[in-house]
């Protein structure tokens, strides 16, 4: 008998909220967090884009991360851990301390060999990599330049120039002894397995901007097939560094939103005046998936069930979508087919919707070709900006909450749409039984999930 897969808990950290409740309230208000990039970054480059969407300050100790964990983990893993604990507690699962020193737990009522972790990330612990790399490259040169700046025979202008250069050579005090484990992308999944004593498959999916969706799709398949009964799944990303390196990489590629007055109106997915995507510092979205009958038996809160997954590859370009959207359409139809549905059954679509000049019209055309103009469509990136590997997970959470509450959020800053499909341009309740969320990625990855309401 085919097993059904329920969404029972969610955890979120993103630019508009550090819990699911804060995040969803921000979505309902149409909130966006747009700020100037750190002034320090302007010491190193001239940028075409000068705005981003930063994360709120996070008290990791208050989120049950020990001092040792904070010292030994990259921020991307810490974000994933914070979101995962919230997801487990929101799913009505309780934790028992296993090892106080390691700050690890077991999940009550779950066979650890029948549980799994499936997490996506675009780059993994790149912040730790850059920090240690900067120490290796700069530390000795900075020390020597500092000694030159202290010489008594140096002209004042030369002293100031050298001192300014020394001040811009930022690095930590050493190459971190745990830099390998902090950097490796699989740490995002492995740390969840360690934290919660999970002995089933623990898998990291790296598919750029589609990573979170791919991870959830793989988790869905494993629960559906019977490999595991419970899965922690989603995506995480962290993109802050003192030099603005991550931001600069996307800026030189010409993908980022251009400056706008006021800045809060710059991010415009599916609008004729779009100019690129709003770069986000990152975030994390984690979902608890369970076999439906198991969830019902324990009285778990059920937000929705996942009923279909599709994944294809364009084989067209490392940087851009195939203009014909053939493989995107094939992905959509595969997901709907697995769900046992027709395109006309889909009432809501959470689009990839980045705001880039080339991709938005292609996506809109494919959606219209498959679904017509009936389903409601919005872009969560119009609120959050682009969180890369976390984006698909956050958008799957939005899709589940939209089905559960019947309140799709607005597609922000959408004044003149690129298409006549049914964009959500003002708050409105809607009776949504079935939704679809999709992600695309550099490389050519396409992935999508079909979610459905579970009626009593």
Image: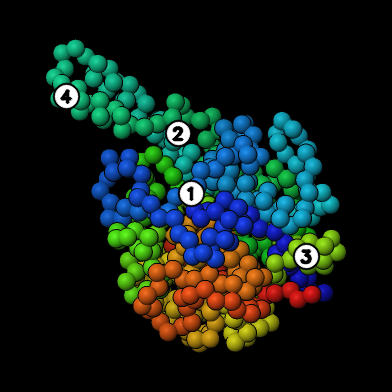
Say whether disc 4 or disc 1 marks the residue closer to the N-terminus.
1
Which mark is on residue 451? none
- The image position of residue 362, as x and y in percent, is 41, 77
Q: Element under label 1? A: loop
Q: Give the label on residue 291, or none.
A: 3
Point out the frontmost of discs 2 and 1: 1
- Would you name the residue on which mark 2 appears? 132
- How busy is the neighbourhood of tag 1: few (under 14 within 10 Å), some, or many (20 plus)? many
The percent coordinates of residue 318 (x first, y second) are: 40, 63
Query: What is the secondary structure assignment of the residue under circle 4?
Result: helix
- On the image, numbered disc 1 is attached to which residue? 55
> Can you name the residue that lies furthest to the right here?
297
Q: Earlier in the sequence, mark 2 or mark 1?
A: 1
Q: State if disc 1 and disc 4 touch (CB < 8 Å).
A: no
Q: Nearer the viewer, residue 405 or 144?
A: 405
Seen at 28% across and 43% down, the residue is 42
Sooner in the amino-acid sequence: mark 2 or mark 4: 2
CA–CA distance between discs 4 and 1?
A: 39 Å
Mark 3 touching mark 2, by CB under 8 A? no
Residue 217 at x, y = what percent? Answer: 63, 65
Rounded to the nearest angstrom, the CA distance separating label 3 from label 4 is 68 Å
Res. 158 mark: 4
Q: Nearer the viewer, mark 3 or mark 2?
A: 3
Q: Where 191 falls versus 208 (above or below)? A: above
The quarter of the image holding the N terminus is bottom right
Query: The residue tagged with tag 3: helix, strand or loop?
Result: strand
Marks 3 & 4, CB-CB < 8 Å contact: no
Q: Residue 454's image quarter?
A: bottom right
Asked if the residue at tag 3 contacts the one at tag 1, i.e. Cβ–Cβ closer than 8 Å, the answer is: no
Q: Is residue 93 left or right of residue 247?
A: right
In this rendering, which labeled residue sits more in front, label 1 or label 3? 1
């Amino acid at each position: 008998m085919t097993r059904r897969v329920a969404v029972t808990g969610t955890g979120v950290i993103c630019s508009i909220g550090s819990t699911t409740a804060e995040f969803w309230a921000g979505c309902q208000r149409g909130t966006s967090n747009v700020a100037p990039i750190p002034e320090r970054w302007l010491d190193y480059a001239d940028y075409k884009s000068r705005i981003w969407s930063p994360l709120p300050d996070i008290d990791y100790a208050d989120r049950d991360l020990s001092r040792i964990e904070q010292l030994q983990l990259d921020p991307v893993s810490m974000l994933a851990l914070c979101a995962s604990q919230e997801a487990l507690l929101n799913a009505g699962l309780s934790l028992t301390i296993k090892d106080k020193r390691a700050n690890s737990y077991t999940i009550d009522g779950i066979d650890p060999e029948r549980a799994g972790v499936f997490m996506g990330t675009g780059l993994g612990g790149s912040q730790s990599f850059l920090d240690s790399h900067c120490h290796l490259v700069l530390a000795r040169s900075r020390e020597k330049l500092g000694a030159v700046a202290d010489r008594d025979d140096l002209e004042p202008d030369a002293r100031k120039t050298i001192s300014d250069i020394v001040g811009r050579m930022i690095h930590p005090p050493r190459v971190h002894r745990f830099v390998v484990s902090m950097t490796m992308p699989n740490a995002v999944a492995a740390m969840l397995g360690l934290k919660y004593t999970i002995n089933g498959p623990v898998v990291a999916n790296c598919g750029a901007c589609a990573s979170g969706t791919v991870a959830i799709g793989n988790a869905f398949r494993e629960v559906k097939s019977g490999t595991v009964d419970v899965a922690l799944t989603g995506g995480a990303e962290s993109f802050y560094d003192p030099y603005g390196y991550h931001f600069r990489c996307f800026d030189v590629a010409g993908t980022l939103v251009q400056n706008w007055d006021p800045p809060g109106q710059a991010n415009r997915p599916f609008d004729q005046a779009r100019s690129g995507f709003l770069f986000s510092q990152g975030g994390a979205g984690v979902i608890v998936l369970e076999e439906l009958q198991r969830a019902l038996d324990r009285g778990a809160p059920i937000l929705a069930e996942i009923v279909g997954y599709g994944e294809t590859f364009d084989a067209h370009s490392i940087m851009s979508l195939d203009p014909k959207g053939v493989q995107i359409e094939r992905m959509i139809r595969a997901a709907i087919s697995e769900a046992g549905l027709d395109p006309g059954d889909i009432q809501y679509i959470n689009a990839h919707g980045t705001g880039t000049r080339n991709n938005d019209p292609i996506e809109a055309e494919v959606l219209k070709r498959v679904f017509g103009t009936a389903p409601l469509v919005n872009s969560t990136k119009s609120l959050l900006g682009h969180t890369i590997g976390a984006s698909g997970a956050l958008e799957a959470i939005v899709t589940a909450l939209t089905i559960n509450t019947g309140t799709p959020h607005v597609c922000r800053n959408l004044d003149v749409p690129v298409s006549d499909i049914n964009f959500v341009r003002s708050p409105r309740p809607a009776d949504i039984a079935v939704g679809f969320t999709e992600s695309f990625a550099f490389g050519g990855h396409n992935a999508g999930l079909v979610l459905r309401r579970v009626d009593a």
